[in-house]
Amino acid sequence: MSGTYDVVVAGCGIAGLSAAVSAAEAGARVAVLERATEEERGGNTRWTEAFMRMKSEDEVSDDFEEHFMANSGFHLDPGLVQETMRAPEDWPAIVKALSFTDPELIGTLAAEAGPTLGWLKGYGVTFSAMPSYLITQSTTRISPVGGGQALIDALAAAAERLSVDFFYETTAEALLLGTDGEVCGIRASSHAGRNQRFMGAVILACGGFEGNAEMQARYYGPAARYIRPVARGGYYNRGEGIRMALDIGAAPCGDFSEYHAEPIDPRSGESEAIVFVFPYGILVDQNGRRFIDEASDAVDAIYENISRVINRLPGGIAYVITDAGLDDVPNWQRTVRSSEKPFVADTLDGLAEQIGVPAETLAATVEAFNAATVDGTFRPLEKDGLGTRGLDPAKSNWARPITRGPYRAWPISSANCFTFGGLRCNSSAQVVDQSGRCIDGLYAAGETMGLYYGRYTGATSVLRGAVYGRIAGRHAVEHGAAATRSAT
């Protein structure tokens, strides 16, 4: 299998399908290469609820750009950041290739979010602010009815109607270069052979490297052994798109030392087997000791950091301990999606035995915690300021004594939703090289585009994939047409 196309897209999640449909709308002949089978196409998008950080279908949340720029990199040179006040075409090369969250990318993402949702609605997607596992929230979100699966179904059907060619169980392996160094295609492999060539402008939308144990160990160190993808789609994301672009001189972007982490029950085989109930109990390590403030903020603002800290604990595991008071929390069951039941016991000693934690230490931990709690009004669905006193680490909200059975416990490990490290792109989704120059014929979108540092700006990953996938598809066609006109 080989062929010549106007645009070749690697990946079939929200970014890849948005790119394919956008290019096909403009009349391009498009190929999509997808490692998974047709039945499992969709990458991470297929398995997510696809939250979007919007206050309406037309406007991003009030904290959208502020949160991104507060997490734009670490100890950045203020002189270089100051250069971004100029028009992008006037930036020096080192700024164009700088590994940081480009304000132009964020501005474009915010401006194009509403129009992109309108575009998706044109293909039958509907959006709603539906109840979710986030029973406390620090920002506004909406999501497609039917989650990420609805996005995949709608865009794949549109692509098929637009005569996009799909090649399943096909893995992109290397970029093909023309005589002037431009990207002119992809070498791929499948059951049909290892040297297939798909010629055309290339859009890399094939995810990060959460499915690649070697890359995770290289970038995250020994604790990577405890991390697994949060959903089945992540196992298909093995980093080839990032690697093949870096191999031809693309500039990296995004924090290669971090990932978007979620706390899950490691016993469960469910996709996104989240355990978000910890603000209403205490978290202990394998030795039965607390190690973090379980409720410093609404759960959506803290779960990522807590999950990362758990990953660095011995064995990469912690346990959330609750008592009968958990049943005072309305709809707490929504905060746990494990297929496995919690450990349950009438006594703390019995619970400690079940989870393999020293009973004496756990009892001492709970006694110290209880002694630090104070009287106050418990308001489970908003930050209530009911915190501990004189305890290190403190618990800032929802701190009530743990005294009444039945006692419940869930194990928690850290899962990788997606990796932060990727490729440096401009606001047209063009990949740039280490000198800040666009690599002709090469685009990236979704996880393959590096963007995040520090704390993930929640509910923006699927949105980023849709917005920049659409931009990449449209720009690749326009750029190709302009190149054809100049050549004639």
Image: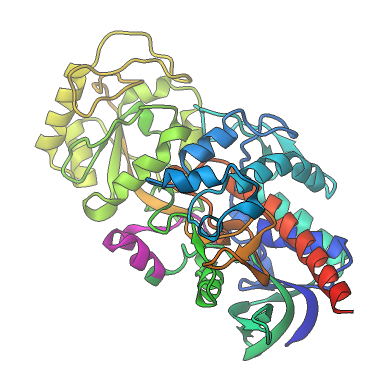
Q: Quadrant of the N terminus?
A: bottom right
Residue extending farthest top: 376
Q: Is residue 373 above or below residue 82?
A: above
Does residue 231 show up magenta in the picture?
A: yes
Q: Could you say where residue 297 lies in the image, as x and y percent from the top left?
A: 41, 27
Q: Could you say where residue 341 lies in the image, as x and y percent from the top left?
A: 39, 43
| Majority SS type along the magenta span | helix
Task: Identify the residue at horizontal 36%, vertical 33% (top origin).
Answer: 278
Q: Is residue 185 visible?
A: yes
Q: Could you say where residue 202 lies in the image, as x and y percent from the top left?
A: 69, 72
Does residue 396 show up magenta in the picture?
A: no
Left or right: 156 as drawn, with respect to 280: right
Task: Identify the residue at horizontal 61%, vertical 45% (top origin).
Answer: 86
Toward the viewer: 86 or 421?
86
Which residues are the magenta region?
Answer: 215-233
Q: Quadrant of the C terminus?
A: bottom right
Q: Is residue 130 above or below residue 79?
A: above
Instruction: Give the mark count.
Output: 0
Toward the viewer: 318 or 305?
305
Left or right: 146 as drawn, with respect to 328: right
Left or right: 356 as drawn, with respect to 92: left
Task: Identify the residue at horizontal 53%, vertical 68% (top origin).
Answer: 242
Task: Identify the residue at horizontal 12%, vertical 29% (top origin).
Answer: 364
Residue extending farthest left: 360
Colour scheme of the rendered structure: rainbow
Q: Is residue 49 visible?
A: no
Left or right: 241 as drawn, with respect to 487: left
